[in-house]
Amino acid sequence: MKRWILSLVIGFAPLLVAQVPNQEVVLSTSAGSKLGIAVPKPSVVGITEEQAGRELHETLLRDLEEAGPFAVLKERQLKSGDASNLKAWVEIGTDWLVTLKAGRPSAEGSDKVSRIVGDEVEITAQVMDVKSAKAVFSKKYRGKDAVLRRIAHSLADDLVARLTGEKGVAATRVVFIRQLSPLIKEVFQIDRDGSSPVQLTHHKSLTLSPTVALDGRLAYMTYKGGPPEIWGQTKPGGPFEKLFPAKGGPQGPCTTPVWSPNGKRLAFVQGDKRGNTDIVVLDVGTGRVRRLTDSNCINTEPTWNPAGTQIAFTSDREGTPQVYLMEEDGSNVRRLTVEGAYNGSASWSPTGSMIAYVSRFEGKFDLFVYKLGEGKSYQITTGVSSSESPDWSPDERRLVFSSGSLGGMQLYTTDLSGNTLRRLTEFSGCQSPKWTRTR
């Protein structure tokens, strides 16, 4: 058991696993029939067709396909989105027809993306309900050529919001740890589709366990100063600074920080000389630290519920690692997972109705989801080796996680059925993903 906490402190998170009886997955990621949506290829002026096709059109199609409520018509596309062809669009199953135009839509309905000022483009997206022949959405987007992909993400999210009332997640990002050399790991971020990687920290040290507040502030654990410390931002876009331990304050190994929903507190793990660890909470504004657990065992991996009133965590207090719940003040501790020898790496869903965690079933490491309303667990991934560190998409439809061997870990996403597994990264050494709207 002491080897377990050592692995947490140096940053190579172990697989915390549990056996759960074979169950049919009944989690649903969408309801009702999907809306048929078509997006004809735009003709272009001022930029290449290859650029517009790859960065705008293809990105938009992928975003809509993964969004959930749409059935994207790809193979049966007509050549024109002209209003005179609405009947033909209906006949191939189209409900919404998306056309992309320069500036305001012209009377001729020309499908163009044109350069308007220097390296900027202006795109007006119009959506027609082809059965009623009425416009249901129109919006203008403007930016530089380099952000065509971001424009596509924003448009996809706006279309999801127009249909469902809830903004999509195409424009979200994933923050994660990437290993650059044997003893150097840094915090990176990528777009939700795996594009546009950006390095966020440059400590040239072992940096681990990123967490993102709702206002975009980043925090993490790093060895840049020698012993492990919690670093982060005290204001959005601000510099990184040491948050814990304060000079003259409580010391000891500290790992796995996680922001509270209101962004005022950080829960994290602090070790002692006996090799035990406990969950503590730091008030970032005052620097006060409060210990929530105090037992002769390992307590680790805290995660807040969306209301900030409860914390799920991993503990071996009954012999093997299991997921437990407690109130935000450390009271009313109770065990959540009851089946299997090992469970851990809990992640609370955005609505608070589910908790994802890592488990082992029949010798394989997989992701499971516990539905709090039912008191049951469901297996999500099968046949994927070393599934670790699950985190939820902001719309609660998908999970991001790391998978692979220690040196070749990649990031993947899956829906809650486990049927749409997608790889996000093309470089190795990825771990600890966090899915966020605010970076």
Image (cartoon, rainbow, N blue to C red):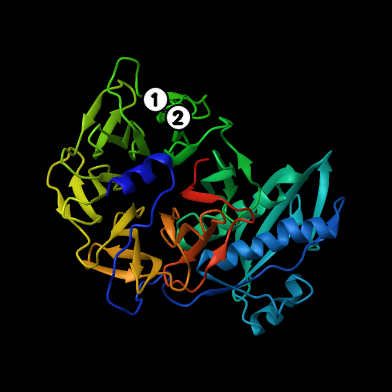
Residue drawn at (86%, 55%) of the image: 48
Which label sits on residue 243?
1
SS class of the residue under badge 1? Answer: strand
State the mark number for residue 19.
none
Quadrant of res 106 = bottom right
Q: Is residue 302 visible?
A: no
**What residue is shown at x 51% (from left), y 46% (from top)?**
176
Q: Counting residues from the N terminus, which is met first, the one under dot 2 or under dot 1?
A: 2
Task: Name the residue tied to disc 2.
Answer: 232
Compare residues 294 and 309 and report the one nearer the observer: 294
Q: Is residue 349 above or below residue 9?
A: below
The CA distance from mark 2 to mark 1 is 6 Å
Check if mark 2's residue and mark 1's residue have beta carbons within 8 Å.
Answer: yes
x%, y% of residue 435?
Answer: 47, 50
Q: Can you tell which quarter of the image residue 214 is in?
A: top left
Residue 6 visible in the snapshot? yes
Q: Is residue 387 left or right of residue 376?
A: right
Residue at the extreme top: 248
Front residue of 85/276: it is 276
Q: Amino acid at mark 1?
A: Leu
Instruction: Count neighbours of disc 2 (C-alpha within 10 A) and say few if under 14, some if 14 to 19, many if 20 or more.
Output: many
In the foreground, 402 or 111: 402
18 relative to 266, above or below: below
Q: Mark 2 belongs to which amino acid?
A: Gly
Position of 375 with respect to 238 (left or right) is: left
